Amino acid sequence: MAYNHEEDEARRAAARDLAKMLLGEARRLTLQFEAIQTLDPVAFHEAVSDLSALVDTLRGETGAGRVEPFRAEPERAFDAGNTENFILDIIGIFPEGASVENIYNGVVESGAAMSREALTVRLHRMLRAGKIMRPSQGHYALPHAPVTPLRRVP
């Protein structure tokens, strides 16, 4: 099937957008793998090994020929809404609450341009808005109570 120049450009733009989205998801997965590593190093190594095998297959290193590496365009800083959602994603990885350091490292790894001071201000605003809670000094969690044997979720 032949595509005209405009259709070709639209397909390439869609592919680049999808690649950017997947790279963002990969960064989130990296944070989740770090959480697995702290909880169970054996499960972490098994999961990383399985992921590595999938990536090798994607690259074609298992016999289908080598694919050239993807060169992503430089990322732009997130806007306020996306940054807040990403902060919520990072906090959600840590059921007991994420430290400011955990959150800051996740934001930095995502490529977002945000200083630690700006993150602290954003966390306080999110806290006041009820989007997050602070179970202890310097730790933030999503605003839902954990389920325990003595307390059930309604």
Image (cartoon, helix red, strand yellow):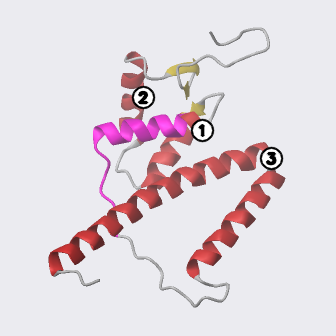
Question: Which quadrant is home to the C terminus?
Answer: top right
The residue at which mark 3 appears reads as: 40
Tag 3: Cα neighbours inside 10 Å, few (<14), some, or many (≥20)?
A: few
Q: Main secondary structure of the magenta part?
A: helix
For marks 3 and 2 on the same chain, the one whose residue lies earlier in the sequence: 3
Q: Is residue 130 left or right of residue 11?
A: right
For the N terminus, give its image quadrant.
Answer: bottom left
Q: Which residue is mark 1?
A: 93
Task: Compare residues 95 and 61 and report the one nearer the observer.
Answer: 61
Quarter holding residue 121: top left
Q: Residues within 10 Å of mark 2 (few under 14, many from 20)?
A: many
50 relative to 40, above or below: below
**Residue 97 % position (x, y):** 61, 29
Q: Residue at x 22, y 80 (%)?
A: 3
- Residue 12 in magenta? no
**Is 63 positioned to the left or the right of 4 in the image?**
right
Near-viewer residue (117 or 56): 56
Q: Quadrant of residue 50?
A: bottom right
Q: Which label's residue is closer to the chain start, 1 or 3?
A: 3
Residue visible at 62% across and 16% down?
145
Q: The residue under label 2 is which amino acid type?
A: Leu
Q: Magenta segment: does it hold 83?
A: yes
Q: Secondary structure at mark 3?
A: loop
Q: In the rendering, which numbered label is found on residue 123?
A: 2
Q: Nearer the viewer, mark 1 or mark 2?
A: 1
Compared with 37, 80 (above or below) is above
Question: Which contiguous range is marked in magenta?
Answer: 73-91
1 above or below 106? below
Question: At 23% across and 77% down in the image, what residue appears?
Answer: 8
The image position of residue 66, as x and y in percent, is 56, 89
